[in-house]
Structure formats: structure tokens, C-alpha cells
Image: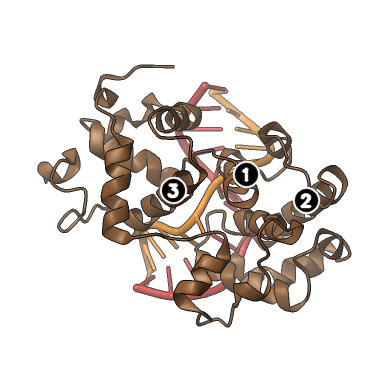
Chain colours: A brown, B orange, C red
Amino acid sequence: MPEQAPYNEFAPEKIYRTLYSYYGPQGWWPLVSYRKRQGFNERGYHPEIYWEPGSASSSFEVALGAVLTQNTSWKNVEAVLARLHELDLIDPANILSLQTDDLALLIRPSGYFNQKARKLHILAEFFLSKLDDGKRIPAREELLALWGIGPETADSILLYGFHVPVFVVDTYTNRLVDRLYAKDETSRDSLRYHGLQELFQKNLPESEVIFNEFHALIVHLAKDYCRSKPLCPGCPLQPGCLTGSHR
DNA sequence: TCCCAGGGGCCGA
DNA sequence: TCGGCCCATGGG
């Protein structure tokens, strides 16, 4: 693993504390915490009814959400999840009872619906046959072996669905690290998914709660400030970020 | 009209 | 290994 100079002062705990005090808890999953903050959301999605901590259906629901949100805004995914709940489809066997074309129509608002319908079928088959309907925690390699599950989706399922302390790396994590520590954004290829994941995991307490919140906080920051075109004024990571200091 | 969203698979070089 | 392309709806 390359030891790049710009990362010598990598201080994820400081970033985490700053973002947490700025935004507060994100409560992505389990959904019950989301409900406690906001109750019913505008789309009528009421997670309390469906979320039972540690239940097979909640792990499967997280997995469904993780696939549906691939390159897709969460609002679209929420609407689809609500629809699946109404039809009692947060259930591997029930998903498998549908034809791929029919499932695709149901999840259409989440985009990439043909691909995702196929992915959900593969996922449902996996939960049912290999995980004893979600009662066993999968190995990371098992998830990665499934068509449609890449590193980010696999880690999201493990962290948010099965409470395994793994740090989820995404585009925003890469962008943030680049802008905080690299001299310019052309050096971003220095670390790939696993390198960046190790970097965070080695420099943070092995805590499911921190990994859960941190990933969500980075996404929040990326929406508000650390966009592809950065909006540095007001960013909680200013001063100190290399990007804002020379713009 | 263009850009982006809580990515991943595939293929050619 | 990598870069480019494809998948596709919905909102700003």
C-alpha cells in the first residue's frame, strides 16, 4: 500500500468530530432513529412499522436499499421501498415470486430498473438460500461474488444491515480526502478503495456507530459543500482544507 | 438543457 | 490494471 506524503497528517477522528458537532447524528440506519427524528416522511414511508432490530427483514431491507441507491438519489429509493413495503415485498421469497419484468416496473423510479431488478433477484436468492433468510452474517467475499454487488454496496450491507464495523468508502470519501490532504485533485489515484478503507479503519476506533455516522456525515457534507464544484464558504472543515485555502 | 444522485459490469487497449 | 461506456429516472 502506497504511503503518500499528503496523507501523513491524516486525522479522521478530528474530521469526524467536526462533522458530527456540525450536523449531529444522521441515523441512516436503523430506520427507527430516522423515524424518531422525523416521524412520517413526505412520501408516507413509515419505517417504524417495518423495522425490527436484528430481524431478517431489516437486513434484507438494507440490502435492497443499498442496491436501489446505486448511483441514485435516496429520495427515489425511499419511494420504491415504500411501494415494496405496501406489497409485502421486503421479503426474499416474495421478491423471487415476481417475474423480473414485473419487478422492474415496480422499481422503475429508482432508475436502472432492468439491471436492478436482476440484482434484487440475485440478492433475494442469496438471502434465502445462503443466509438462512438473513439469519447468518455473510462474508464480504460472498457479497462481492454476487453480480451487482461491488465494494461499496457490500460494505454498506455489512455495516448498515448486519452491524459489522467496516468503513464504507465512496466517491465523496475520495473527494474529501483529496481536497483535504492532496495538493491537487490529479493525485487522487494514489489510493483506491481498500487503501482508503484501511486508512480510515486504522485511524479510527473499531466502532460500528462511528463508521455508520461518519459515512453518512461525509455524504451530507458532499451535498452541502464538498460538491464536484466545491462550495467552500461556510464549510465546517474550513479553515484547514487545502481546497478552500487557494480558491 | 445540463448536471448529478448514498455504483457496478463489461470490454477493449 | 485502466479508461470509457452503458444502464435510466427524477430533481435542481
User: What amino acid is at disc 2?
Assistant: Gly
Amino acid on which the number 1 mark rests in the picture = Leu
> Mark 1 = which residue?
A158
In the picture shown, does residue A126 fall above or below A35?
above
The residue that label 3 is drawn on is A215
Q: Position of residue A19 (x, y in %)?
A: 29, 52
**Same subunit, tags 1 and 3:** yes
How far is mark 2 from mark 1, CA to CA? Answer: 12 Å
Q: Residue at x 46, y 44 (%)?
A: A211
Could you say whether the residue bearing mark 1 is in a helix, strand or loop?
Answer: helix
| Chain for disc number 1 | A
- Residue A227 in sight from this viewpoint: no
Disc 2 and disc 3 in contact, CB within 8 angstroms: no
Residue at the image position 66 percent from the left and 35 percent from the top: A140
Identify residue type, mark 3: His
Q: Nearer the viewer, residue A82 or A134?
A: A134
- Which labelled disc corresponds to residue A134? 2
